[in-house]
């Protein structure tokens, strides 16, 4: 008998299906995933088939214990179904010497995990499959859109390796990565870039790219020169790199953070500032954006509680863009807020955000929306 549990609280979440014949294992895997994905769980592939065809998941976790024939035949059954051709499959088994795991690739699986595996290992594996599917779609975009996405992602991911090795990032590399994005903004042809990251499971990258895009768009509307737009785009891409050191469970926690977790989360600013400060070729504006984008005019921000004229103009812009992006981002624990609602909330932050700049930002978004409708 199949057991199906679907978390429908956030339709923006990616659907993952689990087929596992052992109730305890099936429930453990389902619980491990429900904070990050919608989950449907079954014990029998035959019972699961109608659901799979009507609602194909992006990823499917198939255990060796899957009923009625076992994991090997279950995967063969799935792979023979044309409607499920694009589904990514992860094979699991409680036997790490299992021939089932050894032959997972041959059977058509995309990954294999031996139980017991860490929750983070399972999440990371699924996330990689989700991102591969999204990034493959970039191949169908125009070259300049594709370059904007791939170069920004490669640079963003590369920072993590540089941090681990204690090496600075060169501004020439960041500027080169952001140049296609700035060019798209100058052409007013950037929407395909923002659309391209929808569904991507690296939330920190998606947020950073959106901030880079909107921040340089903001600067373009203010008439800034291309050299300044490149600083803005680079600052947006790098403004949250300190989050790379934040534990995944804290960074993506679906519920309220504890006081201790809040301290850890807010520590990402110091982490960003510390790393950027050790990169001598990065313009000072990038450091200012990273250091002050959570500060507020009324002193209610962090980490230093700066007020008014102590705030850099680039940071004032970045604070507006960062709040807007955070509210309208899709996250594993929330659906994206409508831009109109986000702007109302931001306008109510009269003491925290630079209101003249915010009015310019609102006008910019309204103008962009009108141009999209006309086009």
Image (tube, rainbow, N blue to C red):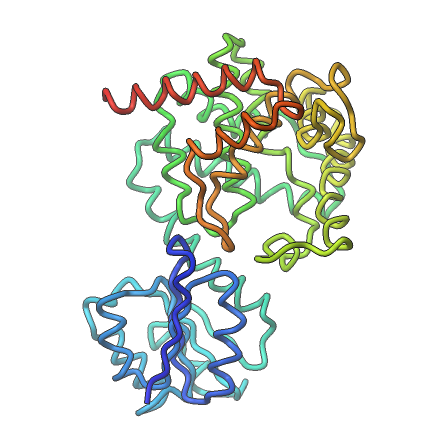
Total number of numbered discs in the rendering: 0
Q: Is 19 situated above or below 321?
A: below
* Place of residue 201 in the rendered image (x, y in percent of width and height, measured from the top left): 47, 52
Q: Quadrant of the N terminus?
A: bottom left
The residue that appears at 66% across and 23% down in the rendered structure is 351
* Place of residue 343 in the rendered image (x, y in percent of width and height, measured from the top left): 48, 29
Q: Is 122 situated above or below 282?
A: below
The residue that appears at 20% across and 73% down in the rendered structure is 81
Q: Nearer the viewer, residue 314 or 136?
A: 314
* Place of residue 313 in the rendered image (x, y in percent of width and height, measured from the top left): 66, 16
Q: Is 189 situated above or below 156?
A: above
Q: Nearer the viewer, residue 23 or 85?
A: 23
The residue that appears at 37% across and 82% down in the rendered structure is 3
* Place of residue 13 in the rendered image (x, y in percent of width and height, measured from the top left): 42, 56
The residue that appears at 41% across and 16% down in the rendered structure is 186
Q: Residue furthest left?
A: 82
Quadrant in the rendering for residue 254: bottom right
Q: Quadrant of the C terminus?
A: top left
Q: Nearer the viewer, residue 290 or 254?
A: 254
Q: Residue furthest right?
A: 304
> Left or right: 209 with respect to 164?
left
Q: Is 242 situated above or below 248?
A: above
């Amino acid at each position: 008998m199949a057991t199906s549990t679907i978390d429908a609280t956030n339709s923006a979440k990616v659907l993952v299906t689990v087929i596992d014949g052992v109730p305890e294992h099936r429930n453990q895997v389902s619980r491990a995933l429900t904070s990050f994905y919608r989950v449907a769980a079954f014990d029998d592939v035959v019972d699961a088939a109608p659901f799979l065809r009507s609602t194909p998941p992006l990823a499917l976790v198939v255990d060796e214990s899957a009923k009625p024939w076992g994991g090997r035949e279950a995967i063969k059954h799935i792979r023979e179904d044309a409607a499920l051709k694009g589904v990514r499959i992860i094979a699991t088994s409680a036997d790490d010497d299992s021939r089932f795991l050894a032959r997972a690739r041959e059977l058509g699986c995309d990954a294999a995990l031996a139980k017991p595996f860490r929750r983070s290992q399972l999440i990371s594996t699924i996330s990689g499959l989700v991102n591969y599917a999204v990034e493959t779609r970039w191949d169908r975009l125009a070259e300049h859109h594709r370059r904007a996405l791939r170069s920004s992602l490669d640079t963003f991911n590369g920072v993590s390796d540089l941090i681990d090795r204690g090496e600075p990032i060169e501004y020439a590399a960041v500027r080169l990565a952001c140049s296609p994005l700035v060019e798209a903004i100058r052409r007013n042809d950037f929407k395909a870039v923002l659309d391209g990251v929808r569904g991507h499971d690296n939330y920190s990258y998606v947020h950073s790219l959106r901030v880079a895009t909107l921040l340089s768009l903001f600067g373009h509307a203010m008439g800034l020169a291309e050299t300044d737009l490149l600083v803005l785009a680079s600052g947006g891409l790098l403004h949250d790199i300190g989050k790379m050191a934040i534990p995944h469970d804290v960074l993506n926690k679906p519920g309220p953070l504890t006081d201790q977790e809040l301290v850890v989360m807010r520590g990402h600013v110091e982490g960003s500032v510390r790393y950027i400060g050790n990169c001598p070729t990065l313009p000072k504006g990038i450091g200012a954006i990273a250091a002050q984008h959570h500060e507020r005019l009324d002193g209610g921000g962090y980490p230093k509680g700066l007020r008014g004229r102590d705030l850099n103009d680039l940071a004032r812009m970045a604070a507006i863009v960062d709040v807007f992006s955070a509210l309208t981002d899709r996250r594993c624990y929330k659906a994206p807020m409508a831009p109109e609602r986000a702007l109302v909330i931001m306008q109510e932050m009269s003491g925290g955000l630079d209101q003249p700049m915010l009015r310019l930002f609102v006008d910019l978004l309204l103008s962009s929306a009108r141009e999209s409708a006309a086009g």
